[in-house]
Image (cartoon, rainbow, N blue to C red):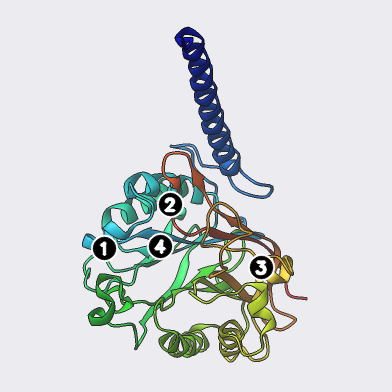
Amino acid sequence: MKNHTSNGRRAGVVCRGLLLSTLLAVVTLSRAIVRADEPQPGAVSATPAGVSVPASDGKTLKVITYNVQFLPGPGAIANKRKNPLYRAQQAGRLLAQFDLVGLNEVFERKPRDLLLEQLRQAWGANYQDVVIPKPNDERFMGGLAIAGRSEFLQTHHMLFSQASSVKKYGFLADGFAAKGVLHARVWRGGQFPKTEFVDVFVTHLESKEAGVRDVQYRELSDFVRQHADPGHPVIVMGDMNTRGNPSYQEQSDSPYNRMLAIYNEARPERPFQDLWPTLHPGQLGGTNEQESSEIGNRIDYIFVSNPPAGHSQLKPQSVRVNGYLDPKVVALSDHSAVEADFEWVDGQ
């Protein structure tokens, strides 16, 4: 005769053991997410609601580029991270500690406006922005924004001439997104004259067709040459949809090296520095997998080009990849942000 009491007791022990193991796994995962979301060395923390951030002192510059994935209309179903209004509110509070914020994929009006409102509240009278689409022209999708807390002296934008077709790729085609480049000439701030500034360019390149991207490299370079002052620093940043992993840096004919060579034609005397390999040589710096910068591909960039000696320059101090993990939505976007700290060095 089988001992049902003994078997039942053993089954109970096994069940309790499985339950305990499951609970431990959940707690471990939860702790891992929280730890990953804690500020890393040099990273910023969220600005408490209602707390103002002082105006820039003109001595340092904190910059971030972030593809936030606020896809518009029916395309919102493709948002990898859901709850865009929550994501926008959280991101706005985190980004308020920067001096310059470059955004990609701010297509959808409500989360875009909510994120920018968080910055406006934190920066007060110092708040500046330039956005495409413009509020009165939603037909020009663009999905780009630059926000800052020093005066914008000039702004320009350009739509790329080519993009992948809606007919071929549907709502996810770049032809539907109408990608381009956004420019802001940003005053240095502090007690410095308005003749001290940095030219900032934010872009989001083609995601589907490599041949189209090649055309866009050239158009972006020409746009930088047209609007950047050769006697002042230039920052180019955004989602380039071009892999910059160490292996691609080593291939002389890779799209990465072609992109960089074409960008440098805009500033032939002062070539662009790609900040990540400059400060973290040999490290991956992946931006399309939020769990870690040591996996995935590096497709989001911050480049800087400084003027010749005798002019004020932006000296890179640090650069970070920040996944902005969040226990409610896993991460605030399907991209990691790239953050950089610069020191202004006066012309000698």
Residue extending furthest front?
A: 1
**Marking on residue 75:** 1
- For disc 3, the marked residue is 276
Q: Which callout, 4 or 3, points at the residue further toward the start of the chain?
A: 4
Instruction: Mark 4 vs mark 3: give the one in front.
Output: 3
**Marking on residue 325:** none
Which residue is pictured at 54% across the width and 30% down the height?
Answer: 27
Which residue is pictured at 56% across the width and 63% down the height?
Answer: 296
Which residue is pictured at 41% across the width and 44% down the height?
Answer: 329
Residue closer to the observer: 3 or 308? 3
Is 94 located above or below residue 157 in the figure? above
Q: How packed is label 2: few (under 14 Cα within 10 Å), some, or many (20 or more)? A: few
Q: Which amino acid does label 3 sit on?
A: Trp
- For disc 2, the marked residue is 125
Is 83 located above or below residue 19 in the figure? below
Q: Which amino acid does label 2 sit on?
A: Ala
Residue 51: percent from the left, percent from the top?
A: 48, 38
Residue extending furthest right?
A: 348
What SS does tag 3 mark?
helix
Marks 4 and 1: CB-CB under 8 Å?
no
Residue closer to the observer: 72 or 227? 72
Q: How far apart are marks 2 and 3 (CA)?
A: 33 Å
Residue extending furthest top?
A: 5
Q: Which callout, 2 or 3, points at the residue further toward the start of the chain?
A: 2
**Marking on residue 129:** 4
Q: How packed is label 1: few (under 14 Cα within 10 Å), some, or many (20 or more)? A: some
Q: In which quarter of the image is the C terminus?
A: bottom right
Q: Can see residue 183?
A: no
Instruction: Mark 4 vs mark 2: give the one in front.
Output: 4
What SS does tag 1 mark?
helix
